Amino acid sequence: MTKTTMPLSELLEKHDEGDFLRTVAEAVLQLIMETDVEGVIGAGRHERAEGRVTYRNGYRDRPLDTRLGTLNLRVPKLRQGSYFPGFLEPRRTSEKALVAVIQEAWIGGVSTRRVDELVQAMGLSGISKSTVSKLCKDIDDRVGEFLNRPLDGDWPYLWLDATYLKVRQGGRIVSIAAIIAVAVNTDGRREIIGLGTGPSEAETFWTEFLRGLKARGLDGIKLVISDAHTGLKAAIARVFDATWQRCRVHWMRNALAHVPKGQHTVVAAAIRQAFGQPDRAQAGETWRHVADQVRGRWPKLAGLMDDSEADVLAYLSFPAQHRTKLHSTNPIERLNKEVKRRADVVGIFPNEASITRLIGAVLLEQNDEWQTQNRYMMVDAFARIDTVEQDPILSISTEAA
């Protein structure tokens, strides 16, 4: 039978300087595997037993990344059947989702070079449809529960941003928008509250998505921050009785497109003077002054500033303690980068369900991490939202549908 103990002196002799804990971990896990595989075989090494069902067939190397570093393990192989230790099996939800997407693509006959290479590298050849269905269902259940959970309480601030992904539809490859909704509640906690996929400029898509959030309990919205998608802006006005903040970062890019590249720094600095003002009234005065200064040389820029003043400066009518996080969609940019990083591995999604599976799993994990962090916003300042003087033209006052 396998020895279940190892002298401390032997471990000390084996370990490299500074790697004692890693060596101990490797030894313990190796002993666990040796004991487990004896149970599977029904006999110990070189033991004759009537209950034996198979024999050993060497080892395969398997690295395991831990906080102690990479553990170099040797997983026992069997002549008949297979053995895989339980502590190596669990994966993060998003990693399971990525595997499922690749498996789905492979089964569906997607012959892109990237997917083929991933399939081979991950050893997924020979995966059956039933195995894929079982794995996908497990992920879909968890992601669906997360994305459709009830939303309790008031959520004063809502960010909406879209990431564009490629998917196969009817034999064609098309680009669709994956819209992510992030909100902050009156406890100062930030949560990912929704994910939807559809055509980027379709008002009906955005409206249905936002109505879905309301149906789950999203309430108390005071400010919605997003880019100026035509369909999205109209949907916000239709569904929420709230102020709309146009993403300042995206607006600045659009504004500087009307100015020669050599003048970008000067013009941007002039416009930012308005952002540094202490309140909405003074910011508006500075904004209009800058617009008049540039009107002679760049009339299109001045016209854009005239038309978008209320939208770009809306955040200045809210508590000063919150403003740094309200003027743009930047608070969810890191989230979008992680989504794109995972999506780029897949390249072309086999269907929209696989997008929800993978991106939803990424969002679930990120949301769990956010809940362990400090509050995202100061709680005391929420009480002052309704006391800050707001310009009537800032409110999107159409009746909510």
Image: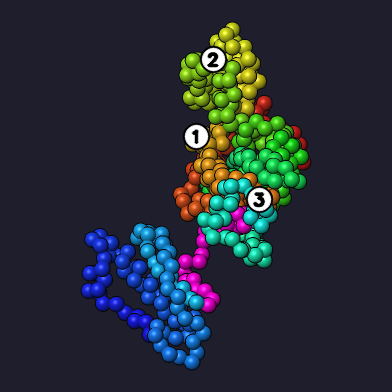
Residue at mark 2: 260
Q: Residues within 10 Å of mark 3 (few under 14, many from 20)?
A: some
Q: Is residue 64 left or right of residue 134?
A: left
In the image, the segment drawn in magenta is: 80-103
Q: Are marks 3 and 2 in contact (CB under 8 Å)?
A: no
Q: CA distance from mark 3 to mark 1?
A: 44 Å
Q: Quadrant of the C terminus?
A: top right
> Which residue has dot 3 on it?
110
Q: Residue 344: horizontal and vertical position, in percent?
A: 56, 44
> Mark 1 = which residue?
324
User: Mark 3, mark 1: which one is toward the viewer?
Assistant: 3
| Mark nearer the N terminus (3 vs 2) | 3
Contact (Cβ within 8 Å) of mark 1 with mark 2: no
Residue at (55% x, 29% y) in the render: 249
Point out the tag, 1 or 2, that comes first from the N-terminus: 2
- Image coloring type: rainbow
User: In the depicted view, which residue is nearer to us: 20 or 206?
Assistant: 20
Residue lying at 59% horizontally and 50% vertically, measured from the top left: 115
C-alpha separation, residue under disc 3 versus residue under disc 2: 45 Å
The location of residue 369, given as percent across then percent down, is: 49, 53
Quadrant of residue 15 within the rendered picture: bottom left
